[in-house]
Amino acid sequence: MLWRLPNVLIIQLKRFSFRSFIWRDKINDMVEFPLRNLDLSKFCIGQKDDRQLPTYDLYAVINHYGGMIGGHYTAYARLPSDKSSQRSDVGWRLFDDSTVTTVDESQVVTRYAYVLFYRRRNSPVERPPRAPSADHHPDLGPATEAATSQASRIWQELEAEEELGPEASGRLGHWGPRGWAAPPRRAPDAPDEGCLRYFVLGTMAALVALVLNVFYPLVSQSRWR
């Protein structure tokens, strides 16, 4: 039960089970969750405000693929409208490492969903302010210019990419503490030593678990005899 409902509700689904010290499982059961109209009024037993609706709309999902030894994370997300969280200024997108693709709303609910992000309907939304234009304003002091958040600079970069189209992705620079910086040169691909290290560690862990699961029951049975 909840005493007061938050503006942003984060729900983590139970995707991992621990049956014993050694045996652990990944849970891939399908969990149906609503994209809109999640009503939590019956779970709120404390403060209730008629002006704040107990209804939530989904705006992001974190997915997990794989098992206990290794896996992969992706995310679905959208940008809710300032006036109505039901509508979206930017439709659903799939974020998979450095790749961002447009997806249909019907693809969001899957059995790989791990963490759900809901926004309460009619709740205030804090958007980062737009970055100042290239023209310098002499009436703004250095303290005001330094107070411009990094989020607003990233926001301006995303808007520039949206205007120029997907072909501009990767060619734009980025905002740094001292202003706009050119895109870095891509280094030649190097062998991923981390993958090999994780593979060796995973193989060793699997062998240890196999030995314990095979010999531990035999030792226990012989001891009881």
Image (spheres, rainbow, N blue to C red):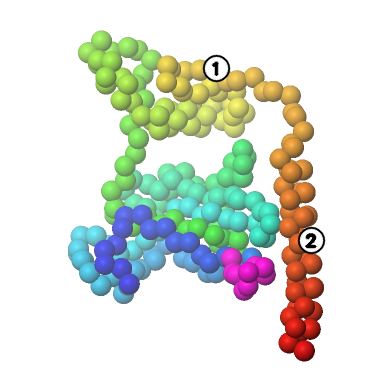
Q: Do tag 1 and tag 2 residues touch (Cβ < 8 Å)?
A: no
Residue 25 seen in the current view: no
Which quadrant holds residue 117? bottom left
* Residue closest to the eye, 57 or 24: 24
Q: Residue at x 51, y 65 (%)?
A: 13
* Residue closest to the eye, 50 or 16: 16
Residue 136 versus residue 51 in the image, above or below: above
Q: Where is residue 94 in the image (x, y as percent from the top left)?
A: 58, 47
Q: Position of residue 11 (x, y in %)?
A: 44, 61
Q: Residue at x 75, y 29 (%)?
A: 190
Residue 108 versus residue 150 in the image, above or below: below
Q: What residue span does the magenta drawing correspond to?
A: 16-24
Q: Mark 2 sits on what residue? A: 207
Q: Where is residue 197 in the image (x, y as percent from the top left)?
A: 74, 44
* Residue closest to the eye, 145 or 88: 145
Name the quadrant of the N terminus. bottom left
Name the quadrant of the C terminus. bottom right
Which quadrant holds residue 40? bottom left
Q: Residue at x 47, y 48 (%)?
A: 78
* Residue closest to the eye, 217 or 36: 217
Q: Mark 1 sits on what residue? A: 182
Left or right of 211 in this view: 129: left
Q: First in sequence: mark 1 or mark 2?
A: 1
